[in-house]
């Protein structure tokens, strides 16, 4: 059971900021605690930037979800970029192919409750994260 | 339907003969939409000049707005857009100021159908002029926004002297690469100018600290260290601390404090000074 989500294109640094603002607005609306808001916004920021920098641009869809007991937020980041060849390596702390700290993907996974990644070389990457209200 | 050169001549003559009545009728229409935000005298001057520019363009044989003889008219229209945009009028209000000219001209036309075709062509000409105004309006606004963004970048990254030998950078808002660069340059320059051995970077106003922000802050700290200054990061709120831990970011041996006051106390402690309240005598 879920409302229809809001979809944003990610094609620039400004779009990353927009995704962050949208996630924060929705996080406040579902009454996530301040700590969880900050964690989710930070995870969204990392993943949106990955979508832009490594995926060559894509989109983020933010949806309010409800599993009957708890409310939450689901965000789907999708790109049609090069995909991730070695997922285990990409999820290793400190590994980066760009100039970053190598903590974005692995860190984002620790910041959310559910983390699913679907990637194939040459087809693109879709990452779905969910954060539930406590 | 483009204006024929005979049509252009005819309207040029019409605009000249009826100039008083035209400008009056034009003003009456525009003044309603502006709701007193522009004085009647000012408006009268603008419409008077525009009418003259239209007349000159048409008399010069302009059949479309792109003609060389319409250059003066285009300049007038841009000037109108610029002043309206800066005064905060909307794009519609600006374009309507030009559209209203058509109605004013219609009133001065002789009461027969013979000029109808020419009037429609003339009307297309004025439409083009109004759209031109609209375009220049948008350009002016975009230039204004770009200017403001740049000013904001300058304003939002002050480096302040907090104490003898201590400078502080209160960061507010999103720290992207462009801002991080400005912050670093400012901080390093201030360290040189003031000869301060300590710098405090306060991130209270940064809503989310992700790996990019952390990396920018860390680079700034390393650069300051290379210049011999010690950096303290302050303003780490509880939710930010928990997020940083979950992300796995390590600040190493860099001193971090919860508030700017704590950071200042820490620095003063290190330099052997203390911040006591002045004692009453």
Image (spheres, rainbow, N blue to C red):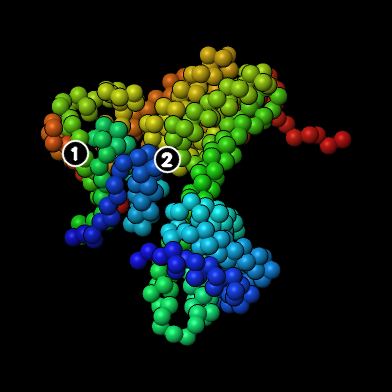
Chain for disc number 2? B
Q: Nearer the viewer, mark 1 or mark 2?
A: 1
Work out whether residue B279 or residue B104 is closer to the camera in this orientation and state it: B104
Other residues around mark 1 within 10 Å, as few (<14) / some (14–19) / many (≥20): some
Work out whether residue A83 or residue A45 is closer to the camera in this orientation and state it: A83
List x then y, in percent, for residue A54.
Answer: 26, 32
Q: How many marks?
A: 2
**Mark 2 highlights which residue?**
B208
Quarter of the image where the C terminus of chain B is located: top right
Is A14 above or below relative to B77? above
List x then y, in percent, for residue B21.
Answer: 61, 77
Is residue B277 toward the left or the right of residue B245 in the image?
right
**Mark 1 highlights which residue?**
A80
List x then y, in percent, for residue B227.
Answer: 56, 14
Q: Residue furthest right?
A: B281
Residue shown at 25% from the left, 42% from the top: A58
Q: Can residue A10 be seen from the camera position used here?
A: yes
Cβ atoms under marks 1 and 2 closer than 8 Å: no
Residue shown at 49% from the left, 82% from the top: B110
Is A112 above or below relative to B15? above
Quarter of the image where the N terminus of chain B is located: bottom left
Same chain, labels 1 and 2: no
The answer to which quarter of the image holds residue A78 is: top left
Other residues around mark 2 within 10 Å, as few (<14) / some (14–19) / many (≥20): many
Is residue A65 toward the left or the right of residue B31 in the image?
left
Residue shown at 39% from the left, 25% from the top: B250
Q: Can residue B238 be seen from the camera position used here?
A: no
Chain for disc number 1? A
Residue shown at 49% from the left, 66% from the top: B9
Q: Secondary structure at mark 2?
A: loop
Work out whether residue B138 or residue B248 is closer to the camera in this orientation and state it: B138
């Amino acid at each position: 059971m879920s409302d229809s989500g809001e979809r944003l294109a990610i094609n620039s640094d400004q779009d990353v900021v927009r995704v962050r603002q949208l996630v924060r607005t929705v996080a406040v609306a579902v009454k996530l605690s301040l700590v969880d808001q900050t964690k989710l916004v930070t995870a969204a920021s990392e993943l949106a930037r990955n979508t832009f920098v490594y995926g060559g641009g894509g989109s983020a869809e933010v949806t309010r979800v409800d599993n009957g007991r708890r409310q939450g937020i689901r965000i789907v980041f999708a790109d049609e970029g090069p995909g991730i060849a070695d997922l285990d390596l990409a999820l290793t702390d400190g590994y980066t192919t760009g100039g970053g700290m190598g903590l974005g993907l692995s860190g984002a996974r620790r910041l959310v409750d559910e983390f699913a990644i679907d990637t194939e070389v040459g087809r693109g990457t879709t990452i779905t994260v969910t954060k539930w209200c406590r | 339907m483009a204006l024929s050169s005979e049509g252009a001549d005819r309207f040029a003559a019409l605009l000249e003969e009826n100039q008083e009545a035209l400008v009056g009728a034009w003003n009456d229409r525009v003044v309603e939409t502006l709701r007193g935000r522009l004085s009647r005298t000012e408006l009268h001057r603008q419409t008077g000049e525009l009418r003259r520019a239209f007349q000159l363009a048409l008399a010069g044989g302009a059949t479309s707005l792109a003609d060389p003889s319409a250059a003066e008219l285009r300049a007038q229209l841009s000037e109108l857009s610029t002043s309206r945009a800066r005064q905060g009028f909307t794009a519609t209000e600006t374009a309507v100021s030009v559209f209203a000219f058509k109605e004013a001209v219609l009133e001065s036309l002789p009461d027969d159908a013979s000029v109808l075709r020419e009037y429609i062509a003339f009307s297309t000409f004025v439409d083009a002029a109004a759209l031109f105004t609209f375009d220049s309006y948008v350009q002016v606004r975009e230039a204004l926004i770009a200017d403001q963004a740049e000013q904001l970048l300058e304003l939002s990254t002050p480096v302040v002297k907090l104490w003898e030998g201590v400078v502080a950078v209160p960061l507010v808002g999103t720290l992207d690469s462009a801002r991080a660069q400005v912050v670093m340059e400012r901080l390093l320059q201030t360290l040189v100018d003031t000869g301060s051995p300590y710098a405090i970077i306060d991130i209270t106003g940064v809503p989310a600290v992700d790996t990019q922000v952390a990396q920018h802050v860390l680079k700034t700290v390393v650069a300051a260290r290379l210049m011999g200054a010690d950096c303290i990061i302050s303003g780490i709120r509880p939710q930010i601390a928990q997020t940083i831990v979950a992300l796995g970011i390590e600040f190493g041996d860099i001193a971090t404090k919860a508030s700017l006051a704590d950071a200042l106390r820490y620095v003063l402690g290190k330099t052997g000074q203390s911040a006591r309240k002045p004692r009453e005598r």
